[in-house]
Image (cartoon, grey):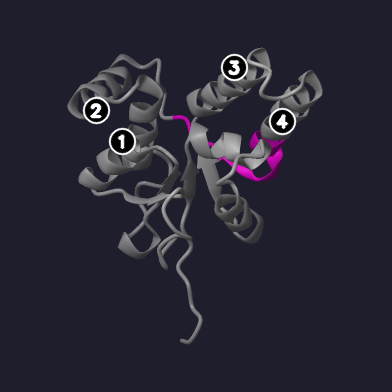
């Protein structure tokens, strides 16, 4: 079947969420990908982290108050009902929290990044077969390396246009 592609869920980390709403020098490839694809997910903690990054950019005068508010609104609207689904594995569950802590220690990740990996490996779309396995899209080289070592397909959007399977 020529042109057939398997459906994949694309998990976006905080660094990518910010690139979708703030003009940064290397945001073009990930914005184009977002514009021309579907099935996007993130965790609520990644969304909160991205909003925190936007706050930091505003407080350092890297973006104006209006840009901060518009960017935050765009993220929230996309996450609630439009383009980006929130996948929640129950971070406040002690068992899940323990998995996140183990992942964070194993790869020297922050909790948000570790939760993203635990979510991809155990969340709503983790049961899909190898051709439809979820993909992590990140601009964080450390998270990309950790994801790869855990067997998660990953695209570091700072490096190239993305693999064919993205």
Q: Earlier in the sequence, mark 3 or mark 1?
A: 3
Q: CA distance from mark 1 to mark 2?
A: 13 Å
Q: Is residue 10 above or below residue 48?
A: below
Q: Is residue 76 above or below residue 165?
A: above
Q: Secondary structure at mark 2?
A: helix
Contact between labelled residues 1 and 4, with CB atoms less than 8 Å apart: no
Q: Is residue 149 above or below residue 90?
A: below
Q: Nearer the viewer, residue 161 or 6?
A: 161
> Left or right: where does residue 66 sit relative to residue 62?
right
Q: Find disc 4 in the rendering and name its residue.
A: 71
Q: Nearer the viewer, residue 61 or 45?
A: 61
Q: CA distance from mark 3 to mark 2?
A: 27 Å
Characterize the local packing of mark 4: few (<14), some (14-19) or many (20 or more) Cα atoms within 10 angstroms: many
Characterize the local packing of mark 3: few (<14), some (14-19) or many (20 or more) Cα atoms within 10 angstroms: some
Does residue 78 belong to the magenta stretch? yes
Q: Find disc 3 in the rendering and name its residue.
A: 56
Q: Residue at x 42, y 68 (%)?
A: 164
Occupied quadrant, residue 53: top right
Contact between labelled residues 4 and 3, with CB atoms less than 8 Å apart: no
Q: Which residues are magenta?
A: 77-88
Foreground label between 1 and 2: 1
Q: Earlier in the sequence, mark 3 or mark 4?
A: 3
Occupied quadrant, residue 147: top left
Residue 97 spot, x, y in % from top left: 31, 18
- The outermost residue toward the bottom is 2
Foreground label between 4 and 2: 4
Q: Earlier in the sequence, mark 1 or mark 2?
A: 2
Q: Residue at x 46, y 49 (%)?
A: 157
- The outermost residue toward the right is 66
């Amino acid at each position: 079947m020529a042109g057939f592609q398997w459906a994949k869920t694309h998990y976006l980390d905080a660094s990518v969420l910010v690139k979708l709403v703030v003009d940064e020098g290397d945001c073009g490839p990930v914005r184009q990908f977002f514009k021309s694809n579907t099935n996007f997910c993130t965790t609520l903690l990644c969304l909160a982290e991205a909003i925190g990054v936007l706050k930091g950019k505003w407080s350092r005068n890297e973006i104006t108050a209006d840009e901060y508010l518009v960017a935050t609104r765009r993220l929230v609207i996309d996450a609630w009902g439009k383009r980006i689904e929130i996948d929640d594995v129950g971070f406040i569950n002690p068992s899940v929290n323990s998995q996140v802590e183990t992942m964070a220690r194993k790869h020297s990740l922050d909790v948000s990044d570790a939760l993203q990996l635990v979510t991809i490996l155990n969340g709503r779309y983790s049961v899909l077969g190898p051709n439809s396995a979820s993909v992590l899209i990140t601009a964080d080289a450390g998270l990309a390396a950790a994801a790869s070592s855990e067997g998660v397909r990953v695209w570091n959007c700072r490096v190239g246009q993305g693999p064919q399977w993205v």
